[in-house]
Image: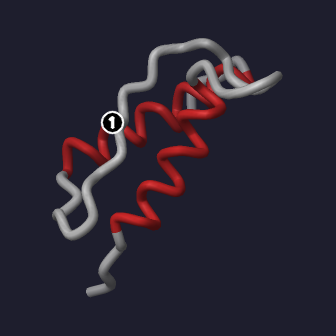
Amino acid sequence: MVDILASDYNTLQQRVANLLGTGTATFGYGQTVQSSAVFQGNTILASQWDNLATDIKSVYIHQTGNSP
């Protein structure tokens, strides 16, 4: 099994949050972000993955107008 580091998860989560949420400068769709960063050394829970997946789907829907 391959371990996914909290830092890798957090990098992806932050990129998605910048797109979906308020972002900075001209970035951000102004939508509610369901996911959040995880603490280093903690196990990433299924619920945290589910929230990140929901955010990614929301970005996809915003960009394409279609559900994945």
Does residue 32 lie above or below 13 as drawn?
above
Q: Nearer the viewer, residue 61 or 12?
A: 12
- Furthest toward the right, the residue is 26
Does residue 63 lie above or below 13 as drawn?
above
**15 horizontally vs 65: left or right:** left
**x%, y% of residue 38?**
29, 52
**62 horizontally vs 58: left or right:** right
Q: Residue at x 34, y 65 (%)?
A: 6
Question: Looking at the image, what colour scheme do you see?
Answer: secondary structure
Classify mark 1: helix, strand or loop.
helix
**x%, y% of residue 47?**
20, 42
Q: Residue at x 26, y 87 (%)?
A: 1
Q: Nearer the viewer, residue 45 or 18?
A: 18
- Name the image quarter holding residue 30: top right
**34 horizontally vs 66: left or right:** left
Q: Residue at x 35, y 72 (%)?
A: 5
Which quadrant: the C terminus?
Answer: top right
Crowdedness of circle 1 by 10 Å Cα count: few (<14), some, many (20+)?
some
Three-letter amino acid code at disc 1? Asn
Q: How many marks?
A: 1
**x%, y% of residue 28?**
68, 23
Q: Residue at x 62, y 34 (%)?
A: 18
**x%, y% of residue 40?**
27, 65
Q: Which residue is mark 1?
A: 51
- Name the image quarter holding residue 17: top right
**29 horizontally vs 34: left or right:** right
